[in-house]
Amino acid sequence: MREEWKRKLSMFLRGWGSSLLVAVLIATSFKSAIADWNDIPSGSMLPTILIGDRVFVNKLAYDLKIPYTTLQIVKWSEPKRGDIVVFFSPKDGKRLIKRVVALPGDTIAMRNDRLFINGQFVRYGPPEKEIVDQIPPIEQDRYVFLSEELPGKQHTVMFAPSRPSLDSFEAMTIPDGKYFVMGDNRDNSADSRVFGYVDRRLIVGRATMVVISREGSFLNPRWDRFLGDLS
């Protein structure tokens, strides 16, 4: 009986088994090195990205890495200010999503939630209404929404005035090969103010699109956010 089982297993591995293994390796390699998605479990990127969004991650945005590793094969671009990037936390290795606000060589500081980059305060103005309206009206009064104009990128951020937060820090210069990232929900985001700079090799790719979105379960889809642009 045992010999018969071994014979059948061997036949399977020589046939469908090997094909299945190759297919799995191809699929997982694709996710590891080319494209993937990221489910959003927290509100640190509100109001730009909502809890329940599933975002597309372009892993070829900046470079090509050896599958299953952070080892770079070839590089053709670098993250820019304003890019939303997926990366491994330098603190505990968890995969996170935040916005790049300062590049290698930049000097950055913050005064009462206002960014100061390379000798100039970042400009703030009225927010985009369609972005703010992603937040339920009953919650909007708890926050302040502003349009933040990073050099080369404008986006909406939100603040919670009543919440204790790291709203100020002294000027620092970003080292070579490092990036300073922050959540758009500035008073409710554990970001580079907490875990420090993000090494270039830890950046997985760029988040470019909300593929699908749901509120709670898939039985409550947010149709208006499907295929929404994040660039």
Image (tube, rainbow, N blue to C red):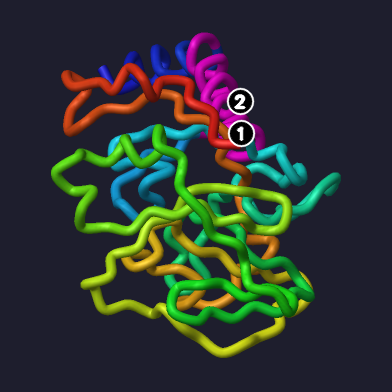
Number of callouts in the render? Answer: 2
Report the residue at 41% width, 20% height from top: 226
Which residue ends up furthest to the bottom in the rendered image?
170
Report the residue at 29% width, 42% height from top: 51
Q: Secondary structure at mark 2?
A: helix
Q: Quadrant of the C terminus?
A: top right
Q: Quadrant of the N terminus?
A: top left
Q: Secondary structure at mark 1?
A: helix
Q: Can you tell which mark lies on residue 26?
A: 2
Q: Which x, y percent locates residue 9?
A: 41, 18
| Residue 97 in view (yes/no) | no
Q: Which x, y percent locates residue 27?
A: 56, 25
Verify CB contact (< 8 Å) between mark 1 and mark 2. Answer: yes
Report the residue at 28% width, 70% height from top: 161
Report the residue at 39% width, 80% height from top: 166
Which stretch is magenta? 15-36
Question: Would you place residue 106 above or below residue 59 in this image?
Answer: below
Residue 18: in magenta span = yes
Question: Would you place residue 86 above or below residue 179 in this image?
Answer: above
Which residue ends up furthest to the left in the rendered image?
138
Circle 1: residue type: Ser
Whether residue 141 sits left or right of residue 19 in the image: it is left
Q: Which residue is mark 1?
A: 29
Whether residue 78 sits left or right of residue 55 in the image: it is right
Q: Can you tell which mark lies on residue 177?
A: none
Q: CA distance from mark 1 to mark 2?
A: 5 Å
Circle 2: residue type: Ile
Question: How busy is the neighbourhood of tag 2: few (under 14 within 10 Å), some, or many (20 plus)?
Answer: few
